[in-house]
Image (tube, rainbow, N blue to C red):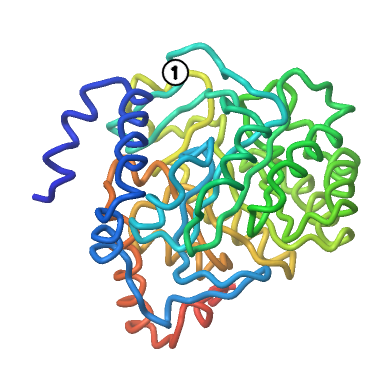
Amino acid sequence: MGAYDLLKPALFGVPPETAHGLTHRLLRAVQTTPVNGFLRDRFVVNDPRLRVETFGNEFPNPVGVAAGFDKNAEVPRGLASLGFGHVEVGGVTAERQPGNPRPRLFRLREDEALINRMGFNNEGADIVGERLDGKPLPEVPVGINIGKSKSTPLDEAPDDYLYTYERVADAGDYFVVNVSSPNTPGLRELQNREALEGILGTLADAGAAPLLVKLSPDLPEPAVEDALGVVDDLGLDGVIATNTTTARPNSLKSPQQAESGGLSGKPIEPIATERVRFVAERTDVPVIGVGGISNAKGAYEKIRAGASIVQLYTGLVYEGPGLAREINEGILDLLDRDGFDSVVDAVGADL
């Protein structure tokens, strides 16, 4: 039994958002101390077979932290010390937002899942931008996820995204346009071709690069193809597949499934992996695979389905701080099993 197994009952004994806050405070406390170096020594897996170069960045391994865990860019160094090969912060909005009323984060323990209806709660682009510019960042790539302010009308979305981008532009190694969260009213309407062209075109004209778009698993396949057409037409650098889902698979056991919001974790893993495959088959740009990853097998399946790198969040809640190390070590074993020399060689092997 590991240390997290001993700590987990206490963390799961308090509301999930409280536990998340405690984790943040602990990471903030250690990331500027020698303990951070100890964590790196314990959790970072250094092996050239894990390195991935994609959309202008070099990732020391393919396993990253998805947006939502570090909304205000407070602990990217602490997360990197846990062995992650990149950290995506945000979603950041132009305006400071309190988010939706609590409770707004729910554990589905029987399903190893979460439901959230956070509502893009964050300190706003001005404060997050100042923090990113003013504090040391980790050596791994840092992505910045940008969302629309709740009060901004949909037809003013391009300027809203641009405001946020301009305030975080100097700190990001890549930028993600989030039009797929289910928790901001009307946001998913921005996944149609005309709206995407307006937002992404505005950011591309402003020099945002590398620029990616994050799509919903609930988007019908023809609409995904339309979105990928915009990606190709504008010369974007990548696609993230996928965000949380409003669907409720029949396999769910937890009574918390009745809560509204976006579902993440193990139940959406097969849906997300198939969406990675669908996207990778239809575009030549790199794909970041997200959804349900909690072990090396799940990460490796997304890589073989076409993901250049992968991200997780919910898995970290259930499996603990050693997860990135466990996944990276497991991927090395799977590469050896299948005769691949590196992660790069395995990307899209099943297509």
Question: Which of 31/329 is in front?
Answer: 31
Q: Residues within 10 Å of mark 1 (few under 14, many from 20)?
A: few
**Residue at the top extreme of this rendering:** 101
Residue drawn 52% across the image and 55% down it: 273
Residue drawn 68% across the image and 33% down it: 126
Query: Circle 1 sits on which residue?
Result: 258
Q: Is residue 308 above or below residue 134?
A: below
Which percent across, then down, holds residue 284?
Answer: 73, 70
304 vs 107, left or right, is right
122 vs 2, left or right, is right
Residue drawn 84% across the image and 42% down it: 199
Name which residue type carries label 1. Answer: Ala
Q: Is residue 194 above or below residue 16?
A: below
Which percent across, then down, holds residue 75?
Answer: 43, 44
Which percent across, then down, holds residue 191?
Answer: 78, 39
Question: For the image shown, how many numbered marks are present on the structure?
Answer: 1
Which percent across, then down, holds residue 150?
Answer: 71, 21
The C terminus, quarter of image: bottom right
Residue 10 placement: quadrant: top left
Residue drawn 32% across the image and 38% down it: 112
**Residue at the left extreme of this rendering:** 1
Q: Name the secondary structure under disc 1.
A: helix
Question: Which of 207/255 is in front?
Answer: 207
